[in-house]
Image (cartoon, grey):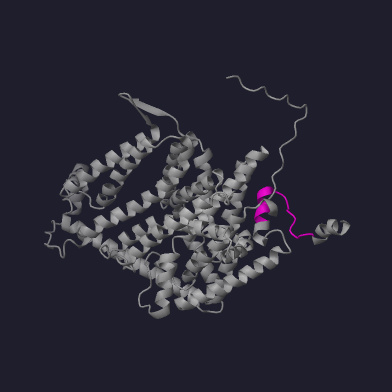
Amino acid sequence: MDAAPATEPSANPPSPAPFAPVATGQRIEALDVVRGFALLGIFLMNIEWFNRPISSLGEGMPRGLSGLDWLASWFVAYFVAGKFWTIFSLLFGMGFAVMLVRAERAGRAFTKLYLRRILALAVFGAVHFIYVWEGDILFSYAVGALGLLIVLYGRARYILIVCAALVGLGFIPDADAFFGVAGGLAAIGLLALYLRGEKRLRWRGVSLPVFCVILLLAGVLMSIAAVVFWVLPNGPTEPRVPLSVFGPLLFITGWLSWKYFDPPEKRSLRMAVSIYIFAGVAMTGMSLIQHFIPDPAAAVASVDKKPVASAPAATPDAASVAPPASAAKATAEKPKKSKEERAVEMKAEREKRLKERSARKAEEIKVFSTGTYLETVDWRARQFLEKAVGDAGFAVALVGMFLMGVWFVRSGVMEDSTRHLAFFRKLALYGLPLGIGLGLLTGFITLSHTPGDRHDGWGIARGLMMLGNLPACLGYVGLVVTMLHSRSAFSRIRVLAPLGRMALTNYLMQSLICMAFFYGFGLGHWGMPRAQQVLFVVVVYAAQIAFSHWWLARFRYGPMEWLWRGFTYRQVPPLRIDHSAAAAPAQAA
């Protein structure tokens, strides 16, 4: 079929429209409303860690609660925690997609502009972490956004070179952190290979994508290694459980990715869901194995300590004439450690880590409940490198959520949410019962965790809860969009739109208010009871809604949004609304 003739280009084609911040009339209202709703959940979740050491994150509900405090903690733990950072991540991906689509329509380059946006966000996050609160998510999003750019546009050659350089740097003394960053980048490179790689390997008539081959081989090798380590009587015990879980999981993932590799337009959504399921299943599987097998560190109650015969002391003359080969032979003949001795060492190492964890929590409580502002800044600054390295691994999960957000915009579901109300109703109808239900199920296993206890069921509960967070997140999004478009009083949820338009400003404002109210150098209300924390959130959140409406009636953007946009687009966007210009046409008419 012949192609239609192209129109003759003009002598001076119009230049692409310059990038500029999204005008108010171009905003997607559903995005702003969901973002405003997510701020409530984020605040409910974050306020606990202005009253409790963040070093105890992952220990579940505090012990000893009763009455309304227990109920408030239980509600946040099973209806809020884990659901709203995923919503925020989803929304971040949607915002990325909106900018990308606008760039494509305008015919402008996108990568450099978005790199400036990421840089600004990273600076905001680092400042927020060090000078305000160590629970910052903005720096994590900046790292995740960089990972998203690598997945979408990164070249394999450069990814491999950077990974090799990071591994090399990791061998420098006290520079082990580079290994973690290299691992995160390697995982992101694999995601890029799945999303954009089209090369295939053929074997006996079977065509396999390179990504699938890598996962299948890794799964087989890890599974074989797991069997060997379990069979060997004196084999290492630490790798047994991870290899036993990740080996079969990687093999199954490789097989599924081969079977569902095409069509390419569905890969991003499939990858996003798979990352979350993979992490949840891996956590649950490892915890199940650890729960039902004996603890290697506690397998031997005591060690038969036999006195070791001391060797006769060598005279200086004898030592001076001893051949070097004797020392090498003595070293080679050094007896291997017994199973009991290794168990004692593992137990001692675990006790050391628990003591360090306990000391860190005690230091954190002292610093934030009674310390000066400079002491809190010093404490957070010392933790920042650890956070940055951890974000390299966390970026893999964030990339998955970002890509899901991209799909919501690319598919048109979010831009024209009215036409897709049936889809959002299904998200709410099926996502909320499944996600919240899985979380509530874990409450019957355990509500709290004792650090160092492998058999309290906490790992199993946490893994199942993680599996439920994604459907619950999507269910909340579906519920809010359905309410927004309803013809009942529920549609008044659009009152949250101004709050969502100023999400960055309001997020940072929540941290500043909590820092001033709870920390020792401020008003000193550290340790506020849980029920009162919820009441505090409701009052501040209501005030933020009112403030956002007041501000946006006079200004185009929130103060932090204005600063962010100015840096991103390298221009100073107008901030104040010119009401006189809007009123002039009406008067002329």
Q: Quadrant of residue 373?
A: bottom right
Locate residue 345 relative to residue 71 in the image: left or right: left
Q: Which residue is rendered at x = 49% and y = 36% of the image?
A: 158
Residue 472 within the magenta-colored segment of the rendering? no
**x then y, percent, for residue 73:** 42, 72
Image position of 572 with respect to 442: above or below: above
Instruction: Give the number of marks.
Output: 0
Closer-to-camera residue (307/464): 464
Residue 575 within the magenta-colored segment of the rendering? yes
Closer-to-camera residue (46/29): 29
Image position of 495 with respect to 337: above or below: below
Q: Which residue is rendered at x = 32% and y = 39% of the image?
A: 218
**x then y, percent, for residue 292:** 21, 58
Q: Name the image quarter holding the C terminus.
A: bottom right
Closer-to-camera residue (176/443): 443
Res 349 seen here = yes
Closer-to-camera residue (67/121): 67
Q: Name the image quarter holding the N terminus.
A: top right
**x then y, percent, for residue 323:** 20, 43
Q: Which residue is rendered at x = 35% and y = 25% of the image?
A: 202
For the record, the magenta segment spans 563-578
Instruction: Tell which residue pokes out farthest to the front in this image.
Output: 487
Res 168 seen here = no
**x then y, percent, for residue 234:** 17, 50
Q: Which residue is rendered at x = 13% and y = 56% of the image?
A: 311
